[in-house]
Amino acid sequence: MPASISASAPTSKASPVAPIDILRFNTCGSVDDGKSTLIGRLLYDSKSLMEDQLEALQRSADLTGGGEINLANLTDGLRAEREQGITIDVAYRYFATLRRKFIIADTPGHVQYTRNMVTGASNANLSIVLVDARTGVIEQSRRHTCIASLLRIPHLVVAINKMDLVDWSEDRFNEIRAEFEQFLPRLDIKDVKFIPISALNGDNVVTLSAKTPWYAGPSLLGHLETVHIASDWNLQGFRFPVQWVNRPNNPKDEKLHDFRGFSGQIAGGIVRPGQQVMVLPGGLTTKVKEIHTLEGPVEEAFCPQSVTLLLEHDIDISRGQMIIGMEDLPGAGTELLAKICWMHPRALMPGRKFLLKHTTHTTQVVVSEITHRIDITTLEPGPAPAGLELNDIGEIRLRTAKQLVYDGYHSNRLTGSFILIEPGTHATVAAGMLLPAKTVVKPDDADFVI
């Protein structure tokens, strides 16, 4: 789940939401396209490295860089990665400029590490797909772009790297762009930006390069600093999974308080004091009395802020339940249809039982059917397989032991996603995206609190 973000709330329903000051993005592409080098260049040229990191680069230069600084070593932390010059695991890095803070996920390019790419991109606002200017668009370029579309990442940057090796040819840049644009209409990505770069030399990464007078767009960092992401969050239906019950004078609190509140992260919509809400499962309704944040009470809060809600009535609510608004109601049920990425070496077979973790709620679940495997290069469904193998993406039917309150992943990434956990080992074996429910919660069925 994303971390809590500090932002000023909108003053009315019609007013725009203030820009969120954290951008999460991932880099992806084929092997040796320069993903780790690009991140190293961003950190190095934006002066976001500590002295000890610079010293570590200098020490590793003779071992891995032939006496020259190897910027990829900033993210390729495993010894196996440095020896092979590839990325295996997902590496996270953090940096900031005067305009915005950034969380970067450097994901591997190999086909067998598709699950790592899904993990790194699951919370991303933006995805950077690197393409080698010499080889152009290949299968992995299409694969990672399709995964970005499947994960509903709203913004895409196609960084055409190693332009220095094709003499900064505008024609070559336009050829790759045209090839990409041939299959983009099949995907659900509305914001796509093409940028010619040289990650090794820094051209068009942090500052614009004089070597591309034919390119009129921003540098990569300039685009990352200004891309509009405030409207990416779902602000239509209020969703509040309860994570923690704050009881009066809780000894775990640094500041003692004398109220009973419900803490968590808003997963959708906007909430205000006096707003009528419903608690699910159960259907009891009440009104919001107060909203508290770390800085104190506020008159309005919205996704993805972390808050504590005080309700007008003393209702028995525990972790795993969800407080929702009375408009744009979610779905609910025990029969689920979902797309998943299978992440375990042992194949998924129908009939297997798992724990399903959805927001703050965990319940037992059985896989009742595997409907089809998805061709990740086209997103087209294939025939129903006997099972899903490691890194496969497919569509399955699930039956839960307890009712789940959720939205389709298409409309809300936070309340439409889940993970499957193996009961014996507690290993995460799959990441899933829920399809819209057939049954929607009905406000007429609610039991009003008096």
Image: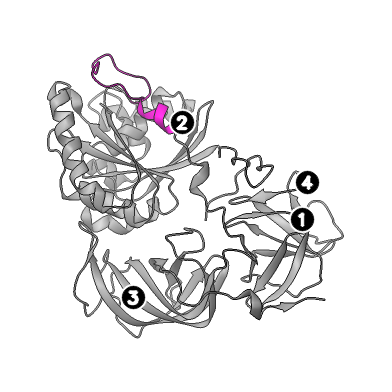
Tell me the amino acid under the disc marked 3: Ile
Tell me the amino acid under the disc marked 4: Gly
Q: Report the disc number at residue 226.
A: 2
Q: Separation of disc 4 and disc 1 at Cα?
A: 14 Å
Q: Which residue is mark 3?
A: 396
Circle 1 residues within 10 Å: few <14, some 14–19, many ≥20: some
- Between 403 and 356, which is closer to the camera in this rendering? 403
Is residue 101 placed above or below 139 in the rendered structure? above
Q: Residue furthest right?
A: 258
Circle 3 residues within 10 Å: few <14, some 14–19, many ≥20: many
Q: Which residue is mark 1?
A: 273
Q: Separation of disc 3 and disc 2 at Cα?
A: 39 Å
Left or right, residue 175 beside residue 64: left
SS assignment at label 2: helix
Q: Separation of disc 2 and disc 1 at Cα?
A: 33 Å
- Between 278 and 76, which is closer to the camera in this rendering? 278
